[in-house]
Amino acid sequence: MQRSQRGFTLIEIAIVLVIIGLLLGGVLKGQEMVNSAKVKNLAGDLRAIPLFIYGYQDKFKALPGDDISATTHLPGGTKASLTTHTPGNGSIEGNWDADDIKNENVLFWQHIRLAGLANGSTDFTTSAKASLPTNAEGGRVGIQMGTPPITNLSGTYFACSGGINGKLAQQLDTTIDDGSADGGSLRAVVTGGTTAATAFDSSKLYTVCLGF
């Protein structure tokens, strides 16, 4: 005797599709929340740097990293090397992504931490690179003065954050500025470049810099 096989009814198929849709929606919503949290952290990194500078100036009447009296103001503090930079000249010297303690923008982080303005290791004597701050994507965070790290970016100081994927960089720019990679006070450049990108590409990594 031939046994008949029962298939799924339309109602059962519809229920399965609804469940799949809910699961996919939950995954996407979860990813969106993760991205939003990362963007919030990335924005916080950049916005904190001006507060560090002004807080240190108010306390010691000097720039962190450039403080010629750092060893007096900060027990355990290091003064920038006279052979590399000029401490006390009113400029935080060095590229934002430098990792050598001879650079004032590396000592910037030691000084603000010893001053109680930020958390983190203050031991820059053995491996400055290991003590430097990173962002939510694992990229470097840094400060630069003088020549802008991105062409035509205006400002006296430049707070930069690297290794950010295009989607997050776009959200970050929209959160802080105008959403344009090559306009406003926050601009983005493909990692390794100096000219602002004309648009964001989710397949690429960017460095974003805020001028202030």
Image (cartoon, grey):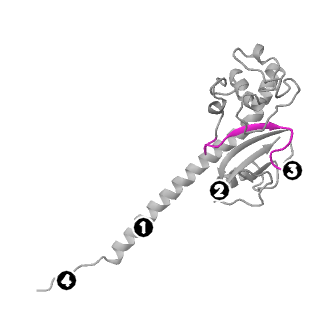
The residue most toward the bottom is 1
Residue designated by label 1 = 18
Q: Could you tell me how far apart the alpha carbons at marks 4 and 1 are, in whole angstroms?
A: 28 Å
> Which stretch is magenta?
135-152
What residue lies at 77% left-to-right and 57% top-to-bottom?
Answer: 197
Rendered location of residue 162, percent (x, y): 69, 45
Q: Could you tell me how far apart the alpha carbons at marks 2 and 3 are, in whole angstroms?
A: 23 Å
**Residue 175 shows in the view:** no
The residue nearer to you, when weighing 126 against 110, is 126
Residue designated by label 3 = 152
Residue designated by label 2 = 167
Element type at marker 3? Answer: loop
Check disc 4: other Cα within 10 Å, few if <14, some if 14-19, many if 20+: few
**Does residue 204 belong to the magenta stretch?**
no
User: Of label 3 and label 1, which has the lower sequence position?
Assistant: 1
Check disc 2: other Cα within 10 Å, few if <14, some if 14-19, many if 20+: some
